[in-house]
Image: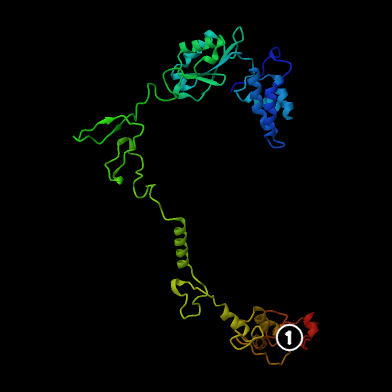
Amino acid sequence: MSVRRLAEEAAQPQTFAFSSDNEAWAETLIRRYPEGRQQSAVIPLLMRAQDQDGWVTKAAIEHVADRLRMPMIRVLEVATFYTQFQLKPVGTRAHVQVCGTTPCMLRGSDELKRVCREKIHPEPLHPNASGTLSWEEVECLGACVNAPMVMIFKDTYEDLTGERLGEIIDEFEAGRGESVRKGPQIDRHLSVPVGGLTTLTSFRDEGDQSGNRVERTPAANDAPAQGAGAGGNVSAESQAARVDTHAAETDSSMKGPSPAAAAAADNRADDAASVDPSKGAKTPGAGREGGSKQGPTGQVERDAAEFGEAAGNSDGEPRSDGPLKTKGEAAEDRVVQDFKRVPGDAPPAASGAEDLGNRNASASGTFEGERRNTSDEAVNPAASTPSGAENRSQPKTDRDTKD
């Protein structure tokens, strides 16, 4: 990428100001941006300054920076980055940009550059002696199919030859640039093929009464040929890729069911597929089809087992002998009650719980709560008690237990 620098100080004007029309335009443009985002207008303001003076001057860069409250270096970075900004004086009547990329080069862009060197200046980006014309080589300008081409200010001139470009330059030099035809310079409409259309210029009928195929030019009111879906013959070749709209699946003239009827049908389908969870839940075998259970999930039975409704209890308290005892009760039956029990008392009967007190007493000669050695190998309690230890043979009180 080439280094782009501002023009010499001798060519720079001292001040810059927008014209009255451009000033009003700039005010309207800046107000379009949210508060604190006005710096986004830097590119359009620089472009309008170039349209006004023909190129971007140092004074214009400073003016835009002050207008948008930006450091000058930030605006200078934008102006030197984009090649659409001209940083040196160009021709006042025409600045010719010659496309030199591959399509235009293959179609004769070298001849166009030769004409520019002869008629304007041997070097690009140098105005002629009168300062009215200048030229440069640029990259693709977007009209490759009409190569070669040039752009003068904001208009393109395509399908050029060296001779035709010389005539255009002469017209601009004489101040008659507005009268030059824009776009293709040959008998071509926009980007259609040279000489006119070469395909889809006629239809082929299936044949006349004698069976011979005939060609005819389509009329403006011709209807597209229909295929077998409409009861006719095979579609014409020019219509072969089009959808047969007279088929039952794609015929736009066929009306579907009304929205009300369609909505009613959807509601009936939803009602048929829906299941009432409480309907038939207590009947034998209800909800056993398909491997899933519908209706109640057994909560009533669990409540009856836990709170005693099946036994006639109505106080809402859990049953003391039910199969669903809480984990806390089971733990208390196994450990806490044995710890509190007085030696010699019979352990309380607990349904489903093992008599840990008797098992431990027979194994070690003391209750589980009174043991200090957790090893089951020590059968002699005196052997597992340190000398001078406190005598733990006396029954424990509630105060000792809490400690």
Q: Is residue 211 above or below residue 337?
A: above
Q: Is residue 34 above or below residue 285?
A: above
Residue 40: percent from the left, percent from the top? Answer: 67, 32
Residue 79: percent from the left, percent from the top? Answer: 65, 24
Q: Say which residue appears at 65% left-offset and 18% top-offset.
A: 53
Residue 187: percent from the left, percent from the top? Answer: 41, 19
In front: 171, or 24?
Answer: 24
Question: For the image shown, how many numbered marks are present on the structure?
Answer: 1
Q: Amino acid at mark 1?
A: Lys
Whether residue 94 sits left or right of residue 8 in the image: it is: left
10 Å crowding of disc 1: few (<14), some (14-19), many (20+): some
Residue 121, visible in the rendered structure? no
Q: How is the image coloured?
A: rainbow
Q: Is residue 365 above or below residue 97?
A: below
Residue 174, visible in the rendered structure? yes
Whether residue 243 sits left or right of residue 400 in the image: it is: left
- As drawn, the residue found furthest toward the left would be 210
Whether residue 99 sits left or right of residue 211 in the image: it is: right
Residue 157: percent from the left, percent from the top? Answer: 50, 18
In front: 245, or 3?
Answer: 245
Q: Quadrant of the N terminus?
A: top right
Q: Say which residue appears at 64% left-offset and 78% top-offset.
A: 327
Which of the 4 image quadrants contains residue 395?
Answer: bottom right
- As drawn, the residue found furthest toward the front would be 221
Q: Where does label 1 land, which residue? A: 340
